[in-house]
Image: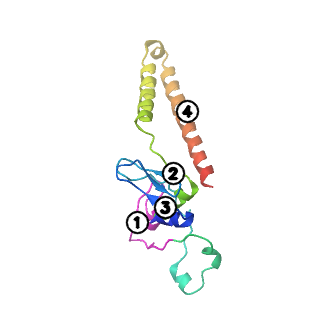
């Protein structure tokens, strides 16, 4: 549904061939995993506006809430169609479709890093562990803890830079 709405907005064609690592939406490639699923860059709780269907039907919803916008109609009550995401444990199911549309239209699609990146990260972690076990370093009891602290700080700074970059692209 999310891809169909994005295509409607762009006026393009869509295609997917079984076994491909991507689908297309207009001129954009949507990266897929081996199981033909995709990673959503979820926006978090209350990032997508909600308008009650009752307010629309009785005419009390402001026109600016829907004018010129893509709209998804779905259930949002508390015990039905809830999904767990990384930022919200009880997101509405319809929000996944809206999130996919937002990801496609903003061009902010997540990609799987791949086996080479996983191997590189594992090799780096192993190198740090091995480094801290070398005799000259172990003789100084404070040095392994310092190396671990520097590695953790470097990871947090890198993660923050990547996360801040994500927020800039969404805005």
Residue 23 horizontal side relative to residue 50, left or right: left
Name the spot of residue 92 as percent of width and height, x first: 45, 66
Residue appearing at x 54%, y 38% in the figure = 156
Question: Which numbered disc flags the more N-terminal residue, 3 or 4?
Answer: 3
The first of marks 4 and 2 along the sequence is 2
In this rendering, would 117 be left or right of 66? left
Q: CA distance from mark 2 to mark 1?
A: 23 Å
Query: How many numbered marks, from 0 up?
Result: 4
Q: Marks 1 and 3: which is nearer the front?
A: 3
Which quarter shows the C terminus? bottom right
Mark number, residue 82? 1
Q: Which residue is mark 4?
A: 154
Q: Which residue is mark 2?
A: 109
The mark nearer the N terminus, 3 or 2, is 3
Looking at the rendering, the stretch of residues picked out in magenta corresponds to 72-96
Q: Residues within 10 Å of mark 3 (few under 14, many from 20)?
A: few
Up/down of 57 relative to 12, above or below: below
- The answer to whether residue 66 of the structure is visible from this angle is yes
Which secondary structure type mostly characterizes the magenta part of the structure? loop
Helix or strand or loop: what does disc 1 sit on? strand
CA gap between label 3 and label 4 equals 43 Å
110 magenta-colored: no
Q: Dots 3 and 4: beta carbons under 8 Å?
A: no
Residue 43 appears in the figure: no
Secondary element type, mark 3: loop
Corner quadrant of residue 81? bottom left
Kindly identify which residue carries mark 3.
13
Q: Residue at x 43, y 63 (%)?
A: 90
Residue 74 to residue 129: above or below: below
Helix, strand or loop for disc 4: helix
């Amino acid at each position: 549904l999310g891809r169909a709405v994005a295509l409607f907005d762009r006026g393009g064609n869509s295609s997917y061939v079984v076994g491909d690592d991507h689908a297309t939406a207009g001129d954009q490639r949507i990266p897929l995993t081996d199981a033909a699923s995709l990673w959503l860059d979820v926006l978090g709780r209350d990032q997508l506006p909600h308008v009650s269907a009752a307010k629309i039907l009785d005419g009390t919803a402001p026109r600016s809430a829907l004018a010129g916008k893509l709209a998804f109609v779905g259930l949002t009550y508390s015990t039905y169609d809830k999904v767990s995401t990384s930022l919200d444990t009880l997101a509405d199911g319809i929000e996944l479709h809206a999130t996919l549309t937002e990801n496609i239209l903003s061009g902010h699609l997540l990609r799987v890093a791949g086996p080479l990146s996983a191997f590189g990260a594992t090799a780096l972690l192993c190198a740090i562990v091995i480094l801290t076990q070398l005799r000259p370093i172990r003789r100084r009891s404070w040095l392994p803890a310092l190396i671990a602290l520097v590695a953790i700080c470097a990871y947090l700074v890198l993660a923050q830079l990547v996360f801040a970059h994500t927020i800039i692209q969404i805005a």
